[in-house]
Amino acid sequence: MPPSGLKPSSTEAPNVRRDLKGIILCLLVALAALVLSPPTHLAAQGLSDRQHIVYFEGTPQELEIYKIYGRYEGPTIMIMGGIQGDEPGGFMSADLYVDMALKRGNLIVVPRANFKSIILFDRGQDGDMNRKFAGVKDQDPDRDRIEIIKNLMAESDLFLNLHDGSGFFRMTWENEMANPSRYGQCIIADADVYTNPRTGQVLELANEAQRVISIINRDIPEERYKFSFSNHNTLSETSAHKEQRKSASFYALTELGIPAYGIETSKQLPSLEMKIHQHNLAVNAFMEIYGVIPEQPRINLDPPVLHYLVISVNGELPVAVADGQTLMISPGDTVEVVHIGANSDRGLSVDVLGAGSLNDIRMPLTIDAATKVIARKDNNTFGQISLKFLPPGSNETSPRLLLASQVNVVQAGAGWLPGMTPPPIEPPKDQPAPTQPTLTVADLNQNGPAIASAGSLPLSPERAASGEVAPVPIASVNGVSGFLLEIDGQRVILRPNQILTIKHGAKVTLVDLETDDQLPARTVMNLRGFIGRPGDTTGNDKGTTADTSKNMISRFAMEREGRMVFQLGAENGPELLAAAYLEISQPRLQSVTLEANGTEKVLKLGQRWGLRPGTQVTVKEVVLDNRLELINPRYTLGGRTFPPRLPQTLTMPSIAVSLAVFTDDDLAGKVVLFPITN
């Protein structure tokens, strides 16, 4: 049996997407788990039982990761599908485990490891991604996702890679489709027994696989569809499968020392549902022998139906455009699809034809010609809307929706759209509107930290500079009247139940608790998701400083429409006396300054520039909204990374490409370069 307990996270952040690398940081995260949650019952601290992480959002390389934590400790199993996009049984089975709740143990689910290949229903548009784990070139579009997947493996006790293989594996030759060279209906390992040369641990891969197969085959009545074990003997010089030394499972086994298997259902099974069901049988059997106690997922093969696309034009209030309808705009308008309303919520993408890339969700794009927006579920197109221009000289306001009405998707209770200023909170209709304004992210960057809570007023820049705090009514909770903080050197008092919105990368010093009564002797000041003093089991963060770009552990956050909210508490042992909240604003691209042929051009988020193929174009400056700074910047052109030192001169390719900006693995946004011939 593998060791119990969830391993420390080496890839963190639901939109923050932090990559915690190295042994020291892994130990810190492990200590956080001990300090911030009881050893056997996650729910006791009110922690979320799942985490959704999105990398490279809005690109064809989008990578979604789901971490599901059991109520009680146990092993962590990683399930991956879709590394080859023409094998739907694997990625559709993995997708079902996303919604699973666990009593014991943990799951890391990567349903669509290669989303681009799935959209195109292709084994690998950029080469076979499952042959790149032994080494991958820096410019390879798959490189970054492979590194993320490797880090996820390092958190796991078992790795399962779900595939659809050709024919039926048999130990001896039966016919062309059933023989030792086929892959379908088997569990594959790289050895019968593997001894980790670094630790001496012996992994009985064949015995473990045979235990799983005996469980699977109980539920497969047809003899020809039963599973077998296939040892690829990959380490041997006589192996017929030496190419598997470049695979994900071989990396997990030989580099990380964890059991790793390929699960192959046959492409020749009579139905997609049967493929999914038999993948489920295999995954469930592994969970059974590893002691991960699940709730069974449901197979849902309902055809995808597009209800509407929610579209914002020029950053204004979005409109809902039903399938088949037309949105009238003006030339040069910026269009952003902010939401896909469908009967499914995963594996979805939209493509603004003639602009952007294969996946344009939440990417503002400048529209210069009438076009269509098509919606896909994986590789199936299931709806579209049209974008057309208002007649020249028309007095009608852009945008105008034909046969549809405007809907407000940023109302109270719905949070706000990522990257947009949060709207004022609308009071219930039977109550008067508040007389005080709710502060926004803009206040943070103009006047210092902004306290967002009903009844509080912003300080003027002059009063903020003097150190004066806002004149709000002070209402203590269990003797706690405030949390004294320093945000990048500026003193702030945060009252109980208030939310302080700060920029990504701000440094927060936890100075002290403000009280109007004697607190219990064991009371500590604890910022959930931050380890102030490694090894200190009291959870007392008083006097420490948190760098919000590096030190926050995202699985302890409460996600608020793409923004991360962390609880700041006054705690007496397990008792929470009072709490306030820190909300971290995420980076968003404002503009990229380019120069080509002696012309300088400033492209705002989503805008396009046409250049002749072969033109030398220099990236001169990148600016983020709200004066945020790039942290560990990374730039890609057409998915290929180029050095982050600016200025940087590149060559315009012969196809349309996105110039994407990442800050510490967060996609801040992109602009588009497209070829012209005249």
Image (cartoon, rainbow, N blue to C red):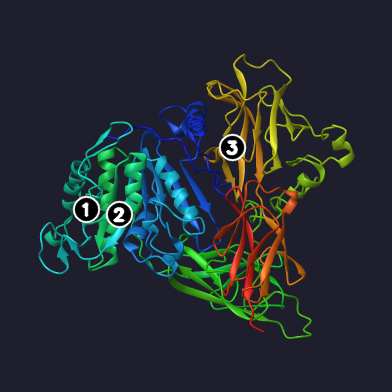
Residue 244: mark: 2
Name which residue type carries label 2.
Answer: Gln
Marks 2 and 3, Cα distance to the nearest angstrom? 37 Å
Residue 239: mark: 1
Query: In percent of the image, x 69 and y 64: which residue is there?
Result: 618
Query: In percent of the image, x 18 and y 55: which residue is there?
Result: 227
Left/right placement of residue 401 relative to residue 123 reads: right
* Residue 410 visible in the picture: yes
Marks 1 and 3, Cα distance to the nearest angstrom? 46 Å
- Helix, strand or loop status at disc 1: loop
* Residue 591 visible in the picture: no
Name which residue type carries label 3.
Answer: Met
Marks 2 and 1, Cα distance to the nearest angstrom? 10 Å
Q: Crowding near pointer 1: few (<14 within 10 Å), some, many (20+)? A: some
Asked if residue 584 is positioned above or below residue 471 in the image, the reply reads below
Mark 1 or mark 3, which is nearer to you?
1
Name which residue type carries label 1.
Answer: Ser
Whether tag 2 and tag 1 are in contact, CB under 8 A, the answer is yes
Query: In percent of the image, x 47 and y 56: which residue is there?
Result: 137
Where residue 656 appears, as percent x and y from the top left, is 58, 72
Residue 552: mark: 3
Mark 2 or mark 1, which is nearer to you?
1
